Image (cartoon, rainbow, N blue to C red):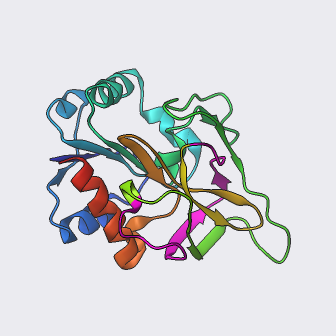
Amino acid sequence: MIALIDYKAGNLTSVKKALATIGADVFVPERPGDLADVAGIIVPGVGHFGATRALDGPWIEAILARVGEGRPLFGICLGMQWLFEGSDEAPELAGLGLLSGRCYRLEAPAPLKVPHVGWNSLGIQREGGLLDQVETGSQVYFTHSYVAPVTGDTRAVTDHGETFTAVVQRGHIGGVQFHPEKSGDVGLRILRNFVELAG
């Protein structure tokens, strides 16, 4: 069973629908204790980094406990940014801190616009894992103004005025800056890869 975390910062309906399409069993936990027996955790999200304030101490403790037991964790868009140490969008808030680095505002020269909205390509740097059976150049759907830095955990990058992390993975912890639930077959493949990682 995959837990889909609801902290009022994501379109849970479309993510649940995408997971149902690939045959995954998913539920939305009401309290941190509901995570005790999950096979994996997905943190979705859109909007401002400040929304992660809703993931308070008990939720963080429960998520970190499951990660410590080796259960996979996957962040989508804002959910991926939360895996890092923090974001300039809400400097007073700490991220989960499982990945090193801080997220920052995307700088794109004219005629490019921020927020970055629409389809863009993946430049795969390391194959396998979440990107198993995904080809470099694959198109996925983005909508965001802040980005994660390129680090040793970056699996794929995208360029929109500058190069930023599109897919990150360290062992059983990973995330994507784009929305796999809106990215057609490529997005479904990445979600399937996560579900398979969760066993």
Viewer-side residue, 170 vs 104? 170
Q: Is residue 198 visible?
A: yes
Q: Could you tell me which residue is drawn at 66 percent across and 68 percent down? A: 116
Viewer-side residue, 103 vs 69? 69
Viewer-side residue, 115 vs 159? 159
Q: Quadrant of residue 32?
A: top left
Q: Could you tell me which residue is drawn at 22 percent across and 55 percent down? A: 196
Boundaries of the magenta span: 131-152
Question: Would residue 152 appear left or right of 135 to someone viewing this image?
Answer: right
Q: Could you tell me which residue is drawn at 68 percent across and 32 percent down? A: 91
Q: Position of residue 146 (x, y in %)?
A: 66, 52
In the rendered image, the vertical position of residue 59 relative to residue 41, given as above or below: above
Q: Is residue 124 magenta?
A: no
Question: Would residue 184 appear left or right of 31 to someone viewing this image?
Answer: right
Q: Position of residue 130 (x, y in %)?
A: 38, 56
Q: Quadrant of residue 144?
A: bottom right
Viewer-side residue, 29 vs 150? 150
